[in-house]
Amino acid sequence: MNAEKYLARLHASRPSAPTAEALRALTRAHLEQVPFENLEIFRQRRCPSLEPEDLFRKVVEEHRGGYCFELNRLFYLLLRELGYDCYCAAARILYRRTDPRPLSHRVIVVNTADDGRWLCDVGYGGPGPKGALRMAPGEQNVAGETFDLREEDGVTAVYRHDPDGAHRLMAFRDEAAMEVDFDVLNGYFGYHPGSIFTRKLVVYRCTEDGLASLVAEQFTLTRQGETVETRQISGEAELASVLADSFGLVLPPCAG
């Protein structure tokens, strides 16, 4: 792990100590600089490698993004390199779903010596938190959005507060998961025809005051919680332009 190159990718400096303040800044920088994207899965029909050297090459050297199993693994490795005490947990995505949901997500739990425990997630996209969340009960505001964490039936549930009420965003057991478990989940979501990531393009990137998203052919830009642009993307040329201008990505060719 070349931490200096990774930090340069994030436009961030090495923190002098593994503090909560530095953690919050690094998490936010990651969300702004490294997009959530499934181009490798959807366009190139490849299941992403989770090997650290492959992730570093893709995200840092090639200036690509990735999805949760990639981004939260690589960010976890950076945090360890910077001296943070942290581990990864497996979560269920529950947002606006009532049916039973499988484990499908990777998050990072970080213990800071100066300010308690934090939940970091740089690989959710969409309605996910746009910064680190304190692992403590009570509502908290992150980048203009409100969340709270609750202990329910032996799991930690993260709630997102929308205009129509609080909704469970995800839930996880507050314990370290094994890497082999994430390998299995990555294999399913990277290959299986039932995976959302094999069926449509999904790209997100935080901006300074909002979020850019591209889901299937629809591009949306929000600022301060308000939609300021939405349009349908038509054709490869327009897709390549949107990916470059709004997400800093190069459109890879489709697999044959």
Image (cartoon, rainbow, N blue to C red):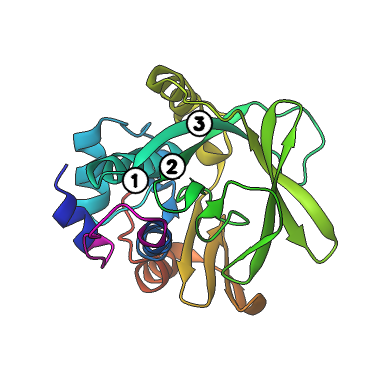
Task: Give percent across and percent down for residue 194.
Answer: 60, 29
Label number found at residue 75:
1
Q: Which residue is mark 3?
A: 89
Q: Which residue is mark 2?
A: 111
- Say what secondary structure mark 3 lies in: strand
Q: CA distance from mark 3 to mark 1?
A: 13 Å
Q: CA distance from mark 3 to mark 2?
A: 13 Å
Pointer 3 or 2: first along the chain: 3
Residue flagged by tag 3: what amino acid is it? Ala
Was residue 16 drawn as part of the magenta stretch in this picture? yes
Residue flagged by tag 1: what amino acid is it? Phe
- Using the rendered image of the protein, determine whether residue 236 is visible from the camera's viewpoint: yes
Residue at image coords 50%, 31%: 89
Decide which of 19, 82 is in the foreground and name it: 19
Residue flagged by tag 2: what amino acid is it? Asn
What range of the chain is rendered magenta? 9-22
Label 2–label 1 contact, CB within 8 A: no
- Where does the C terminus fall, quadrant-wise? top left
